[in-house]
Image (cartoon, grey):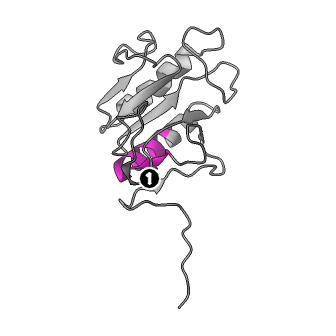
Amino acid sequence: MARISQLQPKDSRDYFMLPQAPEDAGYYVYGTPSGGKFQYAHPSMMTMLLWVEREWAAVDTRKFGIGNISQADAGATSEHSSHVDGLQVDVRALRKDGLQLPVTWHDADYDQEATGRLIGIFFSHPLVKKILFNDTRADARVRTWVHHDNHFHVEL
């Protein structure tokens, strides 16, 4: 019997890992642990992220960073206890220089206008319930939360 190879990693919940380096994508990936081990997404999250990626690519050439979502099979960690069901994702704030590195909203390289546009795209998706980020000037709908100076947390 022929063995079927798995093209995209999937866990026991049938959650797929976010594609790690798709050609011409409007996003890049980051997170700990690396290699997509913390990027298993509920189907609704995957759909939303790919929708936001297409909307973002239509208005900006820079890629945005997608971080932790969920570990395979809902494994939890102490620093990401809310990221277990695949319905939360961390997204990096955007930089003016376009580098794919972290930046806090206090830094000179932080692009508040572009980050606000990206947050607005996320909020325009009907499944987005809340966004946590410590720069309320980027978008007045965000709520502040400890340790959310260099990324925002999106919850479906």
Q: What's the residue at 35%, 42% (across, down)?
A: 87
Q: Main secondary structure of the magenta part?
A: helix
Q: Nearer the viewer, residue 68 or 123?
A: 68
Q: Which secondary structure lies at badge 1?
A: helix
Structural crowding at the residue carrying mark 1, measured as other residues with C-alpha within 10 Å and reported as few (<14), some (14–19) or many (≥20): many
Q: What's the residue at 46%, 14% (across, down)?
A: 138
Label total for image: 1
Q: Is residue 131 above or below residue 34?
A: above
Q: Nearer the viewer, residue 46 or 25?
A: 46
Q: Give how far across and how far down residue 50 sits, in percent.
A: 48, 46
Can residue 82 be seen?
A: yes
Q: Give how far across and how far down residue 49 sits, in percent.
A: 45, 42
Q: What's the residue at 66%, 27% (across, down)?
A: 101
Q: Is 97 one of the magenta-colored residues?
A: no
Q: As drawn, which residue projects farthest toward the bottom?
A: 1
> Disc 1 residue type?
Ala
Give the residue number, with chain letter if any, for mark 1.
72
Q: Nearer the viewer, residue 50 or 83?
A: 83
Q: Give how far across and how far down residue 35 sits, in percent.
A: 60, 48
Q: As drawn, which residue projects farthest toward the front?
A: 78
Q: Give how far across and how far down residue 86 sits, in percent.
A: 37, 45
Q: What's the residue at 66%, 18% (across, down)?
A: 96
Can residue 58 be seen?
A: no
Region in magenta: 38-52
Determine whether, in the image, residue 124 is placed left or right of residue 59.
Answer: left
Q: Quadrant of residue 59?
A: top right
Quadrant location of the C terminus? Answer: top left
